[in-house]
Amino acid sequence: MSLFGAMDISATGLTAQRLRMDLISNNVANINTTRTGELTPAGNPIPYSRQVASFVPRPSETPFARVLGETLGGQSLGNGVQVGSINRDIQEPFKLEYNPSSPDAAKVAEPDLPVGYVRQPNVNIVTEMVDMMSASRAYEANVTALNVSKSMANKALEIGKG
């Protein structure tokens, strides 16, 4: 791996964590959004759904690294990370709140939604704060790795000066 390869890997981590922070801030901003413009087949509004990013290894750019990775069982050989997809969190159910006077209240009963209830977003502020701290720490770690790579490059240049 070249010296600039280490910087590239740190840069991909920085980009990925920045996107993760953007998604977290979007989730927090929409914590009370009960209407997104989407409707269920019964005509009831669908609230905002929490978004999460999934990361995948960045594909190798050199033929040797690709062949070696395939030989080792399809592993990626440290070429960084990229966002594979941004998905809605379907594990966490929507919260229900009884408020028949709300314009977002269910007008037609559905299997998981009685009439008069409003679906609230599945965003939990505690989960978002923990995710934000995790993304922030990962960002800091990538900044530290980038600074170490820059320091090593400077030392190598000083050695070269003689």
Image (cartoon, rainbow, N blue to C red):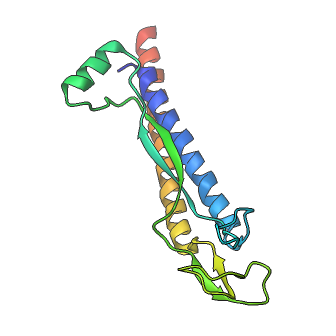
Q: Which quadrant, please, contains the C terminus?
A: top left
> Residue 126: percent from the left, percent from the top?
53, 74
Q: In this view, does 18 lie above or below 72?
A: below
Residue 143 visible in the snapshot? no
Q: In this view, does 77 lie above or below 94?
A: above
Q: Which quadrant, please, contains the N terminus?
A: top left
> Residue 53: percent from the left, percent from the top?
51, 50
Q: Nearer the viewer, residue 95 or 127?
A: 95
Query: What number of labels is visible?
Result: 0
Residue 129 visible in the snapshot? yes
Residue 29 occupies quadrant: bottom right
Residue 78 occupies quadrant: top left
Q: Is residue 153 above or below residue 113?
A: above
- In the visual, does 23 lie left or right of 71? right
Residue 114 occupies quadrant: bottom right
Which residue extends farthest left? Answer: 72
- In the visual, does 37 lie left or right of 28? right
Residue drawn at the location 55% of the way across and 68% of the way down = 129
- In the visual, does 78 lie left or right of 52? left
> Residue 98: percent from the left, percent from the top?
66, 90
> Residue 142: percent from the left, percent from the top?
47, 42
Q: Which of 132 and 146 is in front in this view?
A: 132
Residue drawn at the location 57% of the way across and 72% of the way down = 122
Residue drawn at the location 51% of the way across and 54% of the way down = 135
